Amino acid sequence: MKTIIVVGNGMVGYKFCEKFVAATNNEDFKIIVFGEEPRPAYDRVHLSEFFENQDAKALEMAPAEWYKENGIDLVVDERVTDIQKETKTIITAKNRTFNYDYLVLATGSSAFVPPIKGVEKKGVFVYRTIEDLEGMLAYAAKLKASNPKARAAVLGGGLLGLEAGKAVMDMGLEPHIVEFAPKLMPRQLDARSSKVLQLKLESIGLNIHLSKATNQILGEDHIIGMEFGEDDILGVDMLVVSAGIRPRDELGKTCNLEMGVRGGIVVNNKMQTSDESIYAIGEVALYNQMIYGLVAPGYDMAGVAVNQILGETDSLMPDDIDMSTKLKLIGVDVASFGEPFMPAAKGHSIIFENKTQHLYKRINVSLDGKKLLGGILVGDASDYNMLHQVYLNGMKIPEDPAQLILPASEGGSSFGDVMDLPDDAQVCSCENVTKGQICGVIESGEAKDLADVVSCTKAGSGCGGCKPMVKDITTATLTSLGIEVKDSVCEHFDYNRQDLYKIIEVKGYKSFNEVLDNHGNGGHGCELCKPLVASLMATINADTANKEYAIQDSNDRYLANIQRNGTYSVVPRIPGGEITPDKLIALGEIAKKYDLYTKVTGGVRIDLFGATLNQLPLIWKELIAHGFESGHAYGKSLRTVKTCVGSTWCRYGMDESVSFGIELENRYRGIRAPHKIKGGVSGCIRECAEARGKDFGLIAVEGGWNLYLGGNGGATPRHAELFAEQIDNETVIKYLDRYLMFYMRTAKPLQRTAAWQERLEGGLDYLKEVIIDDKLGIVQDLENEMQTLVNKFECEWTQAVEDPEVMKRFNHFVNSKEEDDNIVFVPMRDQKMPEPWV
């Protein structure tokens, strides 16, 4: 028997063992694995999940029994200290000696700690191992016992630093991110995407400090602050250092292996070091003069090393390694693929940006516009997997490449079906699983659902970035075989939106935790299911966003849209666009008092911009006193019903559009839906209210109203379809009650009426059968449900300003009533605007 010794039992070391066990010609080898930590390999990519339940077992790649069952000797809590190449032996810290035929170094990396004066003080931690996290938790508990408002800083604004920021938040400490560079994630993001990410992180409570060089750690025996300059000090009670990694290459130095100038053990494309019997894989290996800090290249290296040792000499690492990655940082999607940064001489960049929703999408295309070369996604990376496949496989892109990054909520992107991918398309880079392998295990009957696919292929079991695409391919393949597939909302629920609607309605649940505890899969919920359940409970119980503000999207949480400089917009409802002179004067006086930018919108409202968080309740108290109520501009709810002046004033008007528009807006105000809803009422076919571009629109004609349904503006404009002709006011309301409730019951999350209507089997004809002919026998239920919502309406802002507990939300800082003095405005046309971003 030949002996293979693996030094390092992290994710890559474990993957070497797993791949070796799976090989068919491994019977002549014995494996001994050394790990210096006191436990088997665990998933370091999801390390922050340890804070949810502090269960180290949940992160294990495999239990100790797995090693025994597969004939592997696992030695934990013992460090290898020396390699004797001449005798092919290793020596451990316990002075034990072991012989090898092949040696695999998978020692990974350690946290880089900058040489800052005072970094050895108590309260300074690195973010690398479970033991590090346990130490942080214990220290944080002591801090909070003596100071409930304790603060913690993270040194480093890269991938690991932002993960550490989440850890600090989870421990209940006030979090601060300190970054030397002028932007977050400097290796992955450009300046604009980094700024969008910063705004999002700040909106959920992180304090970001950029361009800060730490001179020293202040305090006697424990940290009390960080000094950046003579008068630039940040007081903190704890510091987590996450400033990068350094390869654990000391063993290579002890036996004179070839080393990189800046560290790392040099390897060739066989993963061999300068000694043919010694291999290096993972973050300790310097390949093509680079250390690859992602798990997928490490897994590929492990596979190549296994194959080489077993004599499969054709197995080589490719020259070009794909560094594309998708992550969820503190609930925020961040992804980059291909060439995220690209010189203008090589291609064109197309950018979509929506700072109010913290979205940034950039794609780089070739000069001829035919190839996708790379890109960056922040805030919404739902299209990452397909974009990545288009890039990897050189697939054809639309004549207008901008269609690739239009928001899904505005009609979807111009991708083909996942089944259009070639069979050899690599879907899971961590485990090197192709589309063909996924389809194969389903078609053979080996896998019957998504869980089976993951179990059989391990696709999605690494970083998890490919899970959406694995799910899509699984669903499409099962459907093609005639097998019904349930479309669950997320990993926390095995139900789709319609199922959850019925569960909440029948059981009468009033809180998210009730739904999760009784019908969920454990955990605490996520940014997908929390706002969804909130929306459903609002639809069923007429709850406002104030009831469970913690599960709302950020705009609903503060009942206002956050703007690009961290201020908020104030949008009172002006039904139908009709406003009295007194109310108009009141708006002007309030805007002048609080120095707000004022604009009349295309939706017949007046928007007031530039309010700070703490000003919002003060402004709304005054607005409510003058008879205004929330315009729900921040919510997935009715926005406006736009009207022309109709027969009241216009000589062409066929009916009184303003009065009917006001009636409809007051009827449907406050209802929560899968997406925002807009209406329009035009007094004649000249269509001054643009009714056919709305979710529902009315045009006055001889003999009544023509009702149009399913239109929208936005990135993918769609005309509404004619649903009914020459109907009276009462019939319009009856049909709209039914239509809107049917939409609210059955649409997918974030699906506009246009997309929902288009995807309904049977389309408009089916809708007419349901709404007009009562094909399903539910119209009375739909009308009753809508009337319940109408009767229970309450203005959210009136609730907020009358409730002292709700008012506590509207402070910039959790530990102070001070305002944010970083907000800067500049003059613009006798008003003001946020200072431009550089």
Image: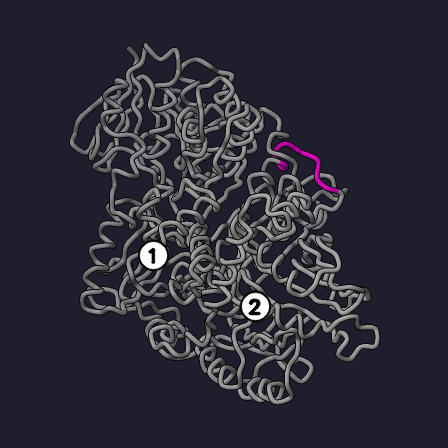
Vertical placement of residue 731 versus 362, above or below = below
Specify whether residue 232 is painted magenta: no
Residue contact at pointers 2 and 1, CB within 8 angstroms? no
Image coordinates for residue 34, horizontal then vertical, percent = 25, 29
Q: Tell me if I can see residue 211 in this picture.
A: no
Mark number displayed over residue 667? 2
Quarter of the image that includes the N terminus: top left
Q: Position of residue 641 (x, y in %)?
A: 64, 68
Q: Is residue 79 left or right of residue 648?
A: left
Q: Which residue is mark 1?
A: 115
In front here: 686 or 139? 686
Does residue 391 belong to the magenta stretch? yes
Q: Is residue 271 above or below residue 706?
A: above
Q: Secondary structure at mark 1?
A: loop
Residue at horizontal 71%, vertical 71%? 657
Q: Which residues are magenta?
A: 390-398
Q: Amino acid at mark 1?
A: Pro
Residue under the image location 52 percent in, 27 percent down? 478
The residue at the point 25 percent across, 54 percent down is: 136
The amino acid pointed to by label 2 is: Arg
Answer with the quarter of the image where residue 811 lies.
bottom left
